[in-house]
Amino acid sequence: MEFNSIKYGNSSIDFQLVYKERKTLSIKVFPDTTVVVSAPCKTPMEKIVEKVKSKAEWILKQKSFFLSYEPRTLDKTYQSGEGHLYLGKTYRLKITESKNKSTKLKGGYIWIETKDKSQTQKIKEQLNEWYKSKAIIHFNTLYENRLGLAKELSEKQTSLKYKWLNNRWGSCFINGTIYLNLELIKAPKECIDYVLVHEICHLEHHNHSSSFYQLLSKKLPNWKASKEKLEKLLS
Ligand SMILES: [Zn+2]
């Protein structure tokens, strides 16, 4: 594999070049915004550059689509009374000092018991641990509900993983591993399910082609509304 780059207007497009036994050249943009060009063996470099340039507009559009899918984080102060989202609803923090740490939902509050109320970084970590514990439960339930779809679209053994991601809601790897951003636990279940189905559809189409969207619309007719809801809530 070779790494290359072309200039296009004010942008530069980096791409990986793979030579293959094939007749035509193809360009793919993956959800992590990497661009892969597969070219027939012995295609001259000028030809490849020319082709990438002719497709530059489309490549940049694909990349910006993936980037628009990225979550943004807001600055929080982690003090009592501040609103924090959980499954699409806002709960106020109630922070009290105690020898034992605990975090729970109680009476419309996210109640955090901590040793020192002034340690906001510690409170943030404690809250994120709680979010993660809830995410593991809800993500797995939603994933189990969609296992049938995953099996229908791919013979590969799929698996679900989760972590805090800065720049995307989820991703789907060619080996069948699906990642969900833990941040999604702040969104309604319908939005988490939308990201999950989106990633599962990538098992069949590892791109955002029209076939991909046809499949997504067939499997989740209301996906656009869920996508808008998610972007409104968490961006
Ligand atoms: Zn995608």
Image (cartoon, rainbow, N blue to C red):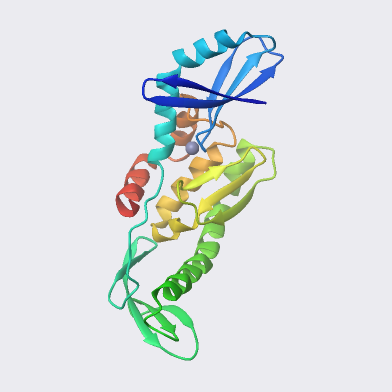
Residue at image x 60%, y 54%? 161
* Nearest to the observer: residue 146 or residue 16: 16
How many numbered tags mark residues here? 0
Q: Is residue 88 above or below residue 108?
A: above
Which residue occupies the foreground of this view, 79 or 188?
A: 79
Name the quadrant of the N terminus. top right
Residue 17, percent from left and from top? 62, 22
Answer with left or right where residue 80 lies relative to residue 103: left
Of the pair 193 and 69, the residue shown nearer to us: 69
Residue drawn 34% across the image and 53% down it? 234
Give how far across and how far down residue 235 sits, in percent: 33, 50
Please, is residue 193 above or below residue 152 in the view? Answer: below
Name the outermost residue toward the bottom. Answer: 99
Q: Along the horizontal axis of the image, is 152 left or right of 69?
A: right
Q: Residue 104's quadrant in the figure? A: bottom left
- Residue 21, given in percent of the width and then of the height, sits at 72, 14
Residue 230 in sight in this render: yes
Q: Residue at x 50, y 34 (%)?
A: 33
- Tell me residue 130's x, y (percent): 48, 71
Say whether residue 144 is visible.
Answer: no
| Residue reaching furthest to the right | 21
